[in-house]
Amino acid sequence: METFDHNALQETLSAMMPGAVFNTNPQFVEAVVPANDLHKFALELKMNSKTQFDYLVCQTGLDKNEELSVVFHLRSTKLNHSCVLKVITSDRINPEFDSVFDIWKSAEFFEREIFDLLGIKFKNHPDLRRLFLEDDFVGYPLRKDFVDNINIVQ
C-alpha cells in the first residue's frame, strides 16, 4: 500500500469542512469540528470518494476539567489513511452529541461506554443505556469531579 500524504488529506478535509480546526500531528490528520456539524461531516467522511473512512477504529470520551470531548479514530481500509475527529462541549450538566451509530455500527458500544462512564448523551442512539454499571449507579466515574465515597477512589 502506498503512503498517504497527510497534507493532501488535510486539504481535502478543509475543503469538506471549512469550520474545522486542524491540529498538527505527525501520525495523522486531526480535526476539531463544531458539534452541530458532527453527523453531517462524519457521513461525508465515509461516503466521499476522496476519503472513504469506512472503519471507526475507536471512539472515546475525555474530561479535560473545563470541557468534555469525544474523539473518533477513523481509518480508510480502501485508501490507507487515518484521521482523528474531535468534538468538544463545555456543557458539563447536559453534554450531548449526535450519534454516529447509523454511519459506523461499531459506535453502538463505544457510545454506550462513553455515556455510562462520562455521562455524555448521544442523540438518535438506538439503545443508550448503561453498559458496565448498574442502572441505579449515581455519577460518572471517569469524570474528574467524580467522588467515590464507597470505594474511596479519587
Image (cartoon, rainbow, N blue to C red):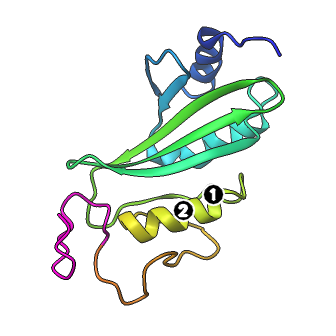
148 drawn magenta? yes
Q: Quadrant of the N terminus?
A: top right
Residue designated by label 1 = 107
20 on left or right of 56: left
Residue that appears at 36% across and 63% down? 118
Q: Which element is circle 2 on?
A: helix
Quarter of the rendering containing residue 101: bottom right
Are discs 1 and 2 less than 8 Å apart at CB? yes
Label 1 amino acid? Ala
Residue that appears at 26% across and 66% down? 93
> At which x and y percent is residue 138?
29, 82
Residue that appears at 61% across and 20% down? 15
4 on left or right of 112: right
Quarter of the rendering containing residue 139: bottom left
> At which x and y percent is residue 132?
48, 75
How dense is the environment of label 2, judged by Cα within 10 Å: few (below 14), some, or many (20 and up)? many
> Residue 70 bears which disc, if any?
none
Q: Quadrant of the C terminus?
A: bottom left
The secondary structure that most of the magenta stretch takes on is loop
Between 33 and 132, which is closer to the camera in this rendering? 132
Q: Farthest residue to the bottom: give it.
A: 136
Quarter of the rendering containing residue 92: bottom left
